[in-house]
Structure formats: structure tokens, C-alpha cells
Image (cartoon, rainbow, N blue to C red):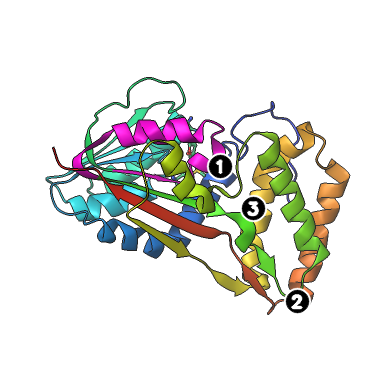
Amino acid sequence: MSTIETERPQARYALGHSPEEYDRLRAQARVWEDATGRLLDRVGLGPGASCLDAGCGPGETMRLMAERAGPGGQVLGIDTDTSLGATALAALHDAGHCQCSFHAHDLTCGEPIPGAPFDLVYARLLLFHLPQRAAVLARLWDAVAPGGHLLVQDYDIRGVTVLPALDSVGELDRVITGVFHAVGADVHTGARLPQLFAQAGIGRPDGVDVAGRLEPLATGRAFLERTFRSVLPVALAHGITTSADATGSLAAIDRDAARFADCPMGWPLLIGAWKRKEPA
Ligand SMILES: C[S@@+](CC[C@H](N)C(=O)[O-])C[C@H]1O[C@@H](n2cnc3c(N)ncnc32)[C@H](O)[C@@H]1O
């Protein structure tokens, strides 16, 4: 069994910045590649477009944007994590997507978004983490060019289920949800996107999309377990679990994943909403 990280200062961003978390983000992005690509196509992203990926993380959506915008387009990723951004940019340039750039920027700081306006402003799994999510959404809308689109995808964790219900899965879910609540995240952000659009003064979305994923517990448990490991330092700091209980929880999911290998496990729902800004 690998060791459990116990020493990290209390962080606002619950998932942290470990190499394991970066790998988890890349794996998660691969899972949702079709669901995101479908919506990029739905809003008509095409050659020559200028795009912003807000909270770009490992840059996997920047790649999908670059493939569509082509060499005549522009793709800017912004994120507070400069190390992850630099790694993402190097990989994109290595793959020939030289129209991509990265800018370190905190979307909660109130400063204007660099490089605005854009034909497409996109954010995935970002607002979930930000207590100021309506204000940030309004800022993203301000960065959309007339005639351009805002497109947001975020989780509603009510999709996380296993049949039959298992205590081991329930415990990981309790800790993960507890951490997100403790840092002011909203685990139902995806379902609330239409309300958030209204609160941000954007109005009703032009469209809403719901994507899900079901896989056997034998493989699906990796999503839960990796998320649990990423949030564990914050869980320990907040007393949501103990080191001994966490070790026991990981052993329990090991046992259940062997015993109930074929049982279906659902991922969080990935909910998308988009809106076109009126042309000038
Ligand atoms: C769960 S990850 C999602 C990454 C990427 N959008 C994806 O779907 O693969 C959230 C990202 O938002 C970034 N982030 C968190 N707070 C931020 C803020 N205030 N401003 C900009 N980026 C932020 C994190 O560093 C992280 O890379």
C-alpha cells in the first residue's frame, strides 16, 4: 500500500498540487474528452477562433480547442497553478499546438482577464471549487466577445452511486464531500449552472447538457480512491477522518472492489451549460 500524505498546510483548493493529483486530472480529462469535444462542436468552435480555458489545469481541453481552432486560432489557458500550466504548455507545444499560451492568473482576484475578449470562454470543474462562483462566472461572461460563447461544464456528485450500496464507497464519498463542504466548494455546481447563469446576470443558458459514466467497481473505484487521496491532507487538517481510519477505508474499498468487481459504479454527472453573447 502506498503511503498517505499527512503534512500539507490547510489549502483552499482541496485537491492540492501533487504529481498524483496531476495524473488524476489527466486521466479524468481523458474520460470526459468526448463529452467536452461534443459541446465545443455544439457551440461551433472552428478555425481561427480565439479561446480561453479558465482553470485549464493539465491543458487537455486546450488541446481539444487547438485542434478545432487550428494554427490561425489562439488558445489561452489561465490557472493559479503555474507549475501545472508550464507543464501543460510544454506538452501542447511539443504536440505542435504553438497557438497555445498560458498565463498565471487568479480568477478570484478581481483583475480583468488577460487577453479578453475571446470567441469562446470555457471552464470545466472550476466553479465547483470557488466560493465566489457567481462573481467569477460574471467575470468569464465579461471576457466573451460579442457573438461569442460562454461554455461551462461542472460536476454534480449525486451521480456517484454503486449497486448494491457499499459502506466502503459511502465512507470515501463522505470524506470527499466533507472536505469540499469545509472549503466552500459546491458539490452540486453542475446542476446549479442555470441558476448561476441567472445570478451572474447572464440570463438563461441557450442549452444544457448532462453527461454520465458507468463502469464496473473494479475499475471505477480508481476515480474515488484517487480523489480521496488528493483531498486527504485537507480531510486530516479538518478532522473529517483520521490517518488510521483513512488507511482502513482504503483497505475496505480494496476488499469490496475484489468482492463486487462487476457491480456498476456511476461517476459524478458532468453538466454543461452555454450561452451566446449578442453580436455588437
Ligand atoms: C479540478 S481542476 C480542473 C482542470 C481542468 N479544467 C480540467 O477539467 O481538466 C481545477 C483547476 O482550477 C484551478 N484553479 C483553482 N482555483 C483557481 C482560481 N482562483 N483561479 C484560476 N484557476 C484556479 C486549479 O489550479 C486547477 O488546475
Q: Amino acid at mark 1?
A: Pro
Mark with earlier residue (3, 1): 1
Query: Which span of residues is magenta-colored?
Result: 121-148
Query: Residue drawn 70% across and 48% down?
Result: 176
The quarter of the picture where the N terminus appears is bottom right
Tag 3: Cα neighbours inside 10 Å, few (<14), some, or many (≥20)? some
Mark with earlier residue (2, 3): 3
Residue 1 shows in the view? no
Residue 55 shows in the view? yes
Q: Amino acid at mark 3?
A: Arg
Q: Which residue is mark 3?
A: 226
Q: Which residue is mark 1?
A: 19
Using the image as rendered, state which of residue 185 and residue 220 is in the foreground: 185
| Residue 37 in the image, given as x and y percentages of width and height | 33, 60
Q: Which residue is mark 2?
A: 260
Tag 1: Cα neighbours inside 10 Å, few (<14), some, or many (≥20)? few
CA separation in Å, label 2 and label 3? 19 Å
The quarter of the picture where the C terminus appears is top left
Specify whether 10 is left or right of 115: right
Specify whether 20 is left or right of 106: right
Using the image as rendered, state which of residue 3 and residue 57 is in the foreground: 57
Query: Residue drawn 24% across and 43% down?
Result: 277
